Image: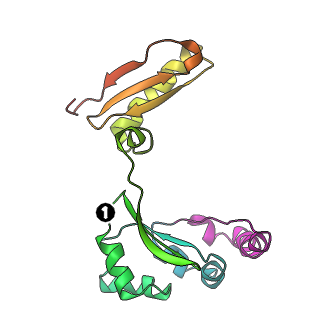
Amino acid sequence: MVFLKHELFKEFIRDWAKTLRKANAALMLSTQNWSDIFNSSLKDVLIETCPNKLFLPNPEATSETVRVYYEMLGVNSREIEMISRAMPKREYYQRTPNGRRLFNIGFGPVALAFVGVSGPEVRARIGEIRKMHAQSGSRNGCVCAVSPTGRITSIPNMERRSPPQTCVVKGWNA
């Protein structure tokens, strides 16, 4: 969270965190490094004004150096163990004033084809397909889905009634 280091933006965050909560609105922040928050002068404001916390799986959560950050957020030993054993990209641990629980997103293969896109090869190929649709003068755009086998399907806007274009990403077994 680079913005936490910028003095002007820090003041905006401090004000927003307090004002938005009073207005029943949400301020959503995410980080991949606990140190971004705990080394910031906004640490207390962020922890106090963001009562809902969503933890991604972290196999390192039980290590001495990482465990301390979870404990500073009030996460107990049992919860830390659950976070460390949660299945990546599927299970998440949520803490709210109303309760705590480990939950499973459980996307099926079709949903994962739309939201589970990762890897530079897949993103590059999707970029190529989008560029191709833009160059062809298509104003309707398209949606790209990736099958579990790595096949990328471009689904044109349904108004066009044209068949989807399918391609295979190099290096993947289709």
| Residue extent of the magenta highlight | 1-30
The percent position of residue 79, horizontal first and vertical second, equals 38, 81
The percent position of residue 126, horizontal first and vertical second, equals 43, 31
**Residue drawn 32% across and 68% down?**
86
Q: Is 79 rendered above or below residue 111?
A: below
Please, which residue is most extreme toward the front here? 98
Please tell me whether the stretch drawn in magenta is mainly helix, strand or loop: helix
Q: Nearer the viewer, residue 48 or 113?
A: 113
Residue 66 appears anywhere in the view: no
The percent position of residue 16, horizontal first and vertical second, equals 75, 70
Q: Is 89 rendered above or below residue 118?
A: below
**Residue drawn 36% across and 73% down?**
83
Residue 125 appears anywhere in the view: yes
Horizontal side of 76 relative to 7 (left or right) equals: left
**Residue drawn 29% across and 71% down?**
85
The percent position of residue 66, horizontal first and vertical second, equals 37, 81
Q: Per the image, is 108 magenta?
A: no
Instruction: Determine which residue is flagged by label 1.
Output: 87
Element carrying mark 1? loop
Horizontal side of 143 relative to 41 (left or right) equals: left
Q: How is the image coloured?
A: rainbow
Q: Is 171 rendered above or below residue 98?
A: above
Residue 124 found in image quarter: top left
